[in-house]
Amino acid sequence: MSFHKDHWLLFSVTCFGFVGLSLIIGILPAKWVQDNAVPLPGMQPLTALEKQGLGVYVGEGCVACHTQQVRPLEMDAAFGRPSVPGDYAYVTPLGPWAPYAPAVLGSQRTGPDLTNAGRRQPSEVWQYLHLYDPRAVVPDSVMPAYPWLFDVVASAPEGATVVPVPAPYAPAEGVVVPNERGEALVAYLLSLKQAPLEAGDEHATAAGGSAANGADGLGAHAGGTR
Amino acid sequence: MAHGTPVLSLKRPLTVSKARVEPVADSDRAWARLVYAYAASAATWLVFGTLVGLYISFKFAAPDIEHVPWLSYGRLRPVHTNSVFWGWGTLALLAGALYVVPRTSHRRLHSYGLAWVSLGLIDLAVVVGDVLLMAGINNGGQEYREFVWPVQAVFAAGVVLLAYNLARTIAGRGIEEIYISNWYIMGGFLWTIPLVVFAYLPFYQQNAIAETVVQGYYMHMGVGMWFTPIALGLTYYSLPKLLNKPIYSYSLGVLAFWTQMLFYTMIGAHHFIFAPTPWWIQTVAVIFSVGMVITLAAGTGNFLLTMRGSGRAIARSYSLPFILAGTVSYFLFSAQGSLEALRSLQGVWHFTNYTVGHSHLTMYGFVTLLVWGSLYGLLPRLTGREPPQLWVGVHFWFAVVGLALYGGALSVGGTLQGLSWMSGVPFIESVKQMASFWLWRAVGGTLMFLSHLVFAYNVWRMRPAAVAAGEARADVALEEAAA
């Protein structure tokens, strides 16, 4: 018996060794985290419109440039308190074509973290303007404009929000109103607010569900800031 | 056989003539067509995928260049990454594997028909996946698994069929020993197939933190358990073959193989250091990231010691410089990856463009350069046609200089980005100070893209000759440096 000569031995050890390691480091931890994730007290599930907005957020690839995770580091304090597993308990799959929770945590900050976007910029009008043309409100922004989340109409229909686009950025004629996807995305962005996390509260500390998860999630943050 | 001399002359003031390949005597035309189809398909994806990448790099300087939803940055970014991963990198490595596995197994490929089906499935998956991404339909925004599951299932079917095809070829080999190249190549398949299955099963990914645990596991292994082992497997064949001497140490290759599996599998969570995922998987990831230095030293040491004393042969070859540069990149930039995993350095570099620079220095500087070396070294032996030497040289220098500009700009810029965040100035300052670095990135990217056009032309020049030089000789009488 030798790996050099017995191909089935070589192939089996290679494949099943990897499967075993995968269970230890990937699959079982994921299952365990999932089973122990409970929402923080005071968190609301996403409304139907906000959930649709999450779909727009994911489909347009916003996650390519924006994170939604605050690390227990001083430089992240501007974005909120350190994130805990419970913060994401309501980020759930979008549908049969994407039966996984969307990857909102992100990996790049070409733009700022959006964990508390709804708290930082609570104005619906600001959010619409910014999506219609980011440079209308942040001159140095390199974010893409999303005019396809809006309609340009002769006059705004009943109940529609007119986006007050300043002259250099406005269309030559008509007024700008958000379409359904635009409204959904802004509803989602405005819903991005961290729930309070009372210090010393036993339940809040165990945000991930069990005390053990709390240690790995929250307690770990104390370790991380050392 | 050698045309000209390897010295500068008045007639050729800037270039030297490189060694030519021995006339091909053992070519099998069906085999040549198959391998060439994979290589040509790969080259097409490289040109397309990097055109997309180059275009979106311009958007950092001109975000309002157009407002077409299908061409917006957020949708095109995964088109770029998936096209170069699953279109270019995958098919180029498989072209090499389809040459190396039968060669080192001393027999014909198990089934040419099945291999053509695999190529069709993989191409189809990347085409449909890209179109859906541009339409705004993806799997939930996870890097490198943005294709929705039906598309990825087609891709996986192609890969599984090819794994079967190659495994049967190795199982029916004409020699007793399984050459080390085949360990790495089959390792790539036997690690990546379970990886893709685990990544696409939904049962343990129903909330964002659980999904993030799987994402760290997947995105890391998608790179390092697929591209890395197959690129190394090809090099374990090409390098000794092109130098016409045996590999320095077989045992170092075996050591690197098993440590690749044991260490690399454990380190995916270092992509989410400080995230609210379980702290212990992050710590395990940091520890094994440092452990990867063993794998790296064994792998690159083996290649460099094989090259030792063969400087002249490398200088005389048009394919070996790619392998030398790829080996050096493998060591430098994978070691960079180990350093990046350390929490103190993650504090500065995480979320910055430094990581984008790192992924290009590795996937391009390491994997892509090694693949080019193998394709330039091996394809002419199969098709009977060599690429024009001048244009191979142009390809090499444009690619290497372009990558140096690209990686340099994002490494420096990304570090400044992290320092800007740490200093507590408003976020937009970090965007403003990146402007010049993004410009240099686009300049480097332009050189890289031009080199890909040259490469595509060179691939065309290596197309199989209308009539092969000799009849099929599957028993492979050529001397095997490896055997």
Image (spheres, rainbow, N blue to C red):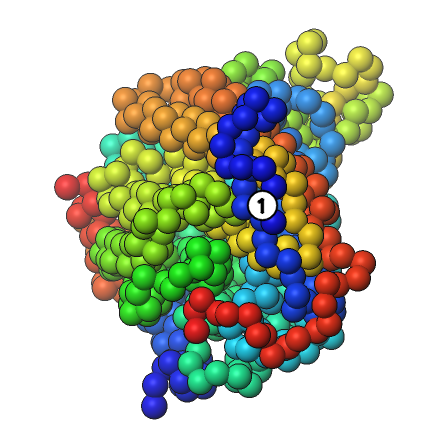
In x, y percent, where is residue A99?
58, 63
| Residue drawn at the location 40% of the way across and 61% of the way down | B245
| Residue drawn at the location 44% of the way across and 45% of the way down | B314
Q: Residue furthest right?
A: A154
Instruction: Decide which of A90, B133 is in the foreground and name it.
Output: B133
Q: Residue furthest left?
A: A226
In x, y percent, where is residue A171?
77, 16
* Residue A37 visible from this viewpoint: no
In x, y percent, where is residue A107?
43, 43
| Residue drawn at the location 71% of the way across and 46% of the way down | B461
Which residue is tagged 1? B2
Q: Quadrant of residue A170?
A: top right
Q: How many marks?
A: 1
Instruction: Decide which of B183, B218 is in the foreground and name it.
Output: B183
Q: Amino acid at mark 1?
A: Ala
Instruction: Read off the chain for label 1.
Output: B
